[in-house]
């Protein structure tokens, strides 16, 4: 590309970023959006790095580099960011519910609106993979391979069900102390691991574990986590508790599931993943000021806004993008880092080279299926400022640029910025 072409691209990016910035109300807490974007991208990169599809003849099976290189466990500490997502989700939901009540919006209408935005993109994933699974079976693909692919593609659905349950319970959770669900997780693990209780008890933690960061988000809305002391307490206390649990209580060091490992911290969640989540939430709270400063840069903010506009599409289709790349690559044979066992540093190096390819495949999925996330409008979600529009996507954009404000001032904020 010539220098003129590079300058033209830069100018186009800057103009687009400027439009996004102009569409953002001055009072919006951009750190909230930055944390949500980081949480989504952390999950995506985590799955792409620690989940491998290994080719054994005509069969594909899942494997993980953590099986062969357990010293890579710190990678899971950086990329398992679900607690931050639930923290932000609890903050946004409790604030939104309080705002809806102040404006006289009934609970059922508020909930229907939130859940429809959450589950609308799911229909496309289920539809495509139903057709794909039937086609693969009819073409003679081994059942084990089809099962592996469908399981990987639909595995993010558990998260949506848990998040939907917590969203529905927002009025009850809005003032719940996070220590209560933490106590439930602690007692479930004591019964399971300390007293030899039944293993099915662990599934109680699927809701209880993620209620902890969700209720922390509600405490954030109430203004109880504004000081840096709260962030440091969560970070240091959570990290220390996790270290004790891993070093002396027998919990795995990896904060994700590892194939073949007897105990998983994530399936179902354990006390260790909850205490680790507390540390993550503390770090997120401490980073708020720096993120607010960083988000003043137009290009950085535009990138974060774009991820938030397409968060569900990215989340639901990232596994499909990885599998599509893997399946296409089989046409060229067994490629290192894509089809080979993840058992060496060489695999890690090749895998890093494949990440941009996965991202390109995800971009294709995003272009094809973002229509569903945006309510079927088919328009761009960026471009509402003041009383008019600089582009399409009026309703979806209003959600992206809505100001984050305490509930008592929401109506006034909307009157000023909409």
Image (cartoon, rainbow, N blue to C red):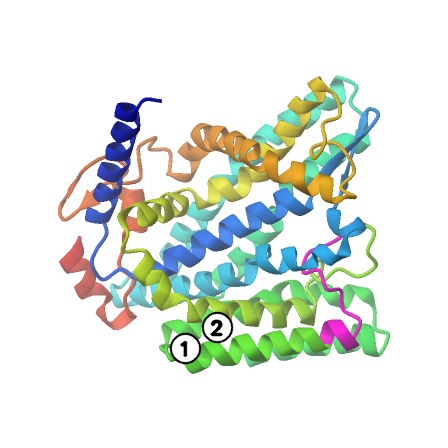
* 175 left or right of 384 in image: right
- From the viewer's side, name the closer residue of 166 and 273: 273
Badge 2, how many Cα within 10 Å: few under 14, some, many 20+? many
Q: Are marks 2 and 1 in contact (CB under 8 Å)?
A: yes
- From the viewer's side, name the closer residue of 327 and 134: 327
Residue on which disc 2 sits: 216
The residue at the point 61 percent across, 49 percent down is: 46
Q: Which residues are magenta?
A: 245-259
* 151 left or right of 417 in image: right
> Can you tell which of label 2 and label 1 is closer to the viewer?
1
The residue at the point 13 percent across, 46 percent down is: 387
Residue on which disc 1 sits: 225
* 3 left or right of 415 in image: right
The residue at the point 78 percent across, 23 percent down is: 141
- Please indicate, yes or no, whether residue 185 appears anywhere in the rendered image: no
Residue 53 magenta-highlighted: no
Q: Which sits earlier in the primary sequence, circle 2 or circle 1? A: 2
| Total labels drawn | 2
Q: Secondary structure at mark 1?
A: loop
- Please indicate, yes or no, whether residue 232 appears anywhere in the rendered image: yes
Q: Secondary structure at mark 2?
A: helix
Query: Outermost residue toward the front?
Result: 3
The residue at the point 61 percent across, 74 percent down is: 239
Q: Name the image quarter holding residue 397.
A: top left
Image position, residue 269 (x, y; %): 68, 63
- From the viewer's side, name the closer residue of 341 and 364: 341
Instruction: Tell me if residue 375 comes above or below residue 165 in the rendering.
Output: above
Q: CA distance from mark 2 to mark 1?
A: 8 Å
Image position, residue 348 (x, y; %): 68, 43
Name the magenta segment's main secondary structure: loop
Badge 1, how many Cα within 10 Å: few under 14, some, many 20+? some
């Amino acid at each position: 590309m010539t220098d003129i072409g590079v300058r033209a691209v830069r100018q186009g990016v800057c103009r687009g970023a400027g439009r996004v910035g102009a569409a953002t109300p001055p009072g919006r807490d951009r750190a909230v959006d930055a944390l949500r974007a980081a949480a989504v991208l952390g999950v995506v990169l985590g799955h792409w790095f620690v989940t491998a599809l290994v080719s054994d003849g005509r069969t594909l099976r899942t494997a993980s580099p953590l099986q062969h290189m357990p010293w890579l466990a710190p990678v899971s500490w950086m990329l398992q960011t679900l607690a931050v997502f639930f923290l932000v989700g609890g903050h946004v939901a409790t604030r939104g519910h309080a705002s809806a009540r102040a404006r006289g919006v009934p609970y059922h209408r508020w909930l229907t609106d939130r859940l429809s935005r959450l589950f609308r993109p799911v229909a496309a994933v289920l539809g495509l993979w139903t057709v794909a699974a039937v086609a693969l079976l009819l073409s003679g693909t081994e059942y084990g391979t089809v099962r592996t692919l469908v399981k990987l593609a639909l595995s993010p659905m558990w998260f949506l069900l848990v998040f939907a349950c917590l969203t529905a319970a927002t009025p009850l959770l809005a003032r719940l102390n996070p220590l209560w669900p933490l106590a439930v997780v602690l007692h479930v693990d004591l019964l399971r691991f300390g007293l030899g209780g039944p293993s099915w008890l662990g599934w109680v933690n699927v809701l209880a574990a993620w209620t902890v960061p969700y209720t922390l988000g509600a405490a954030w809305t109430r203004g109880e986590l504004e000081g840096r002391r709260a962030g440091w307490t969560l970070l240091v206390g959570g990290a220390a508790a996790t270290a004790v649990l891993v070093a002396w209580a027998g919990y795995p060091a990896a904060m994700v599931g590892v194939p073949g490992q007897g105990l998983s911290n994530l399936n179902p969640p354990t006390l260790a993943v909850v205490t680790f989540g507390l540390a993550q939430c503390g770090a997120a709270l401490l980073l708020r000021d720096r993120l607010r400063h960083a988000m003043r840069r137009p290009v950085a903010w535009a990138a974060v806004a774009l991820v938030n506009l397409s968060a569900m599409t990215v989340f639901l289709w990232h596994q499909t993008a990885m599998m599509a790349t893997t399946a296409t690559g089989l046409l060229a044979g067994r490629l290192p880092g894509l089809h080979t066992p993840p058992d060496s540093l060489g695999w890690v190096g090749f895998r890093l080279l494949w990440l941009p390819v996965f991202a390109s495949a995800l971009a294709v999925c995003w272009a094809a299926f973002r229509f569903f996330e945006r309510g079927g409008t088919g328009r761009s979600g960026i471009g509402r400022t003041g009383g008019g529009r600089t582009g399409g996507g009026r309703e979806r954009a209003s959600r992206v640029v809505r100001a984050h404000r305490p509930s008592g001032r929401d109506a006034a904020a909307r009157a000023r910025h909409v």
